[in-house]
Image: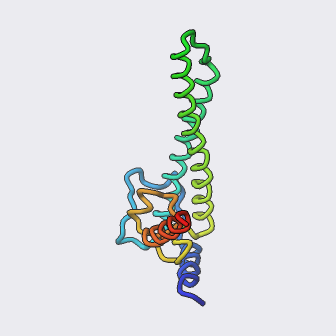
Amino acid sequence: MSDSIMNCAGAADALADAVTVSVAELPESYLPASNEPFMSALQLACFRRKLLFWKEDILREARETLATLQSESLREPDITDRASSETDWSVELRTRDRQRKLISKIDAALRRIDAGDYGYCEVTGEPISLQRLKARPIATMTLEAQERHERIERVTRDD
C-alpha cells in the first residue's frame, strides 16, 4: 500500500476514534495550532465553522444582489448613465457567478470533513499545512503540489 493511502487510512482511523466536536461546542476564540494532533476533532470543527460562515456570507450577498436587481431598474434616462449601470451590474453578476462556483468548492470541503479526507492533499496524501488551510480552507493540495500542478497547466496551455 502506498504511503499516501496509508496517510489517508490513518487519518480516517484517527477521525473515527476522535470525539466529535460540534460547531456549537467549539470555543469562539479557538484557532488550530501545529502542536495539536493534525485534523483533531477541534480542528475539524473549526474549519467546518469557517466554511459554513463563508458559505452563509456568500449566500447573503447573493440574496442582497438579487433583491437590489429586482428593486432597481436600469431605466436610466441618460444613455451614458445606463451604460455605466449595465457595466456595474455585469461586474456584480460575474462576481456572483464566481461565488456560486466557490460554494460548490465549500460544499466539497464540507464533504471531505465528513469523509475524513479534509486537510490531506488529494495528489500526495500528505497533510496540507494549517497556515494554508487557514488562508484557503477549500485547498485540496499542498502548496508544493499546487505549484507543480500550476506549472504543468501553464506548460500545457502554452503548447
Q: Which quadrant of the view contains residue 105?
A: bottom right
- Residue at left 57%, top 70%? 117
Q: Nearer the viewer, residue 9 or 86?
A: 86
Q: Position of residue 155 (x, y in %)?
A: 51, 68
20 vs 8: above or below: above
At 41% from the left and 62% from the top, the residue drawn is 132
Total marks shown come to 0
Residue 58, placed above or below residue 123: above
**Residue at image coords 57%, 9%:** 77
Q: Relative to the observer, which residue lies in front, 120 or 53?
A: 120
In this view, the residue farthest toward the bottom is 1
Dividing the image into 4 quarters, which one contains the C terminus?
A: bottom right
111 relative to 148 in the view: left or right:
right
Query: Residue placed at 51% from the left, 17% from the top?
Result: 80
Q: Position of residue 74 (x, y in %)?
A: 60, 18
Q: Position of residue 146 (x, y in %)?
A: 48, 67
With respect to residue 50, does 95 lie above or below? above
Q: Position of residue 36 (x, y in %)?
A: 39, 71
